[in-house]
Amino acid sequence: MSIFEYNGSALVAMVGKNCFAIASDRRLGVQLQTIATDFQRIFKIHDKLFLGLSGLGSDAQTLHQRLVFRHKLYQLREERDMKPETFASLVSAILYEKRFGPYFCQPVIAGLGDDDKPFICTMDSIGAKELAKDFVVAGTASESLYGACESMFKPDMDHEELFETISQALLSSVDRDCLSGWGGHVYIITPTEVTERILKGRMD
């Protein structure tokens, strides 16, 4: 078993019309044994920027703390919030400087940039970015997430339709992966509000 699969995870971010959604499962396991059913994988950097970290749970928490620290320094120096593109470059640089002993995480970055244009990207554990216009996935359920998102995604969805689509994609995908699941955690971000919802899924 790969170290990336040790705790199990499922992460997906999806773009709508001037909005985006990011969702994860809630299971923390040690291989096939479930340890917690309310584990947080999605973190708010600021009101229009969210970070999801799949992979090893302890490395995800460490990396999140480092990124919050770097973002606060940026806010003090620049007196503004970081743009999603800038934040993606920061995450990439932090991961790449540890390339010989990497954080075992696959980050998903989602935010609203200039003119409230949604930005999503993911990267591997050494910071190689993969940008997308529709959706990005990460974690042990990523293969089934690709299939579900490919079939359900359509461009320019409003925030309610986007919530429905990402929720159905997540729930149907984690049912096909025994290392992730136990409900879901969904954030829908529009230029004016952030909506957080908890999904109930199969408890096995």
Image (cartoon, helix red, strand yellow):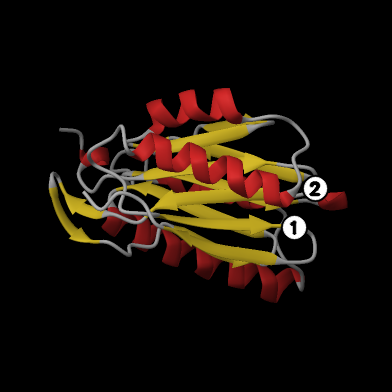
Amino acid type at image mark 1: Thr
Pick the front one: 54 or 148: 148
Report the residue at 28% width, 43% height from top: 101
Placement of 40 over or under 101, stated as above or below: below
Report the residue at 54% width, 30% height from top: 149
For label 2, the crowd category at 10 Å Cα-Cα, with few meaning under 14, some 14 to 19 and many 20 or more, is some
For label 1, the crowd category at 10 Å Cα-Cα, with few meaning under 14, some 14 to 19 and many 20 or more, is many
Percent coordinates x, y for residue 150 in the rendering: 56, 23
Q: Which residue is mark 1?
A: 190
State left or right for residue 1 relative to residue 163. left
Placement of 67 over or under 8, stated as above or below: below
Dot placed on the residue nearer the N-terminal end, 2 or 1: 2
Residue 41 lies in quadrant: bottom left
Pick the front one: 49 or 195: 195
Percent coordinates x, y for residue 146 in the rendering: 48, 26
In the structure shown, which secondary structural element does the residue marked by tag 2 occupy?
loop
Amino acid type at image mark 2: Asn
Report the residue at 70% width, 43% height from top: 119
Say whether residue 168 is visible.
yes
Report the residue at 38% width, 46% height from top: 54
State left or right for residue 121 relative to residue 192. left
Q: Can you tell which mark lies on residue 18?
A: 2
Residue 64 lies in quadrant: bottom left
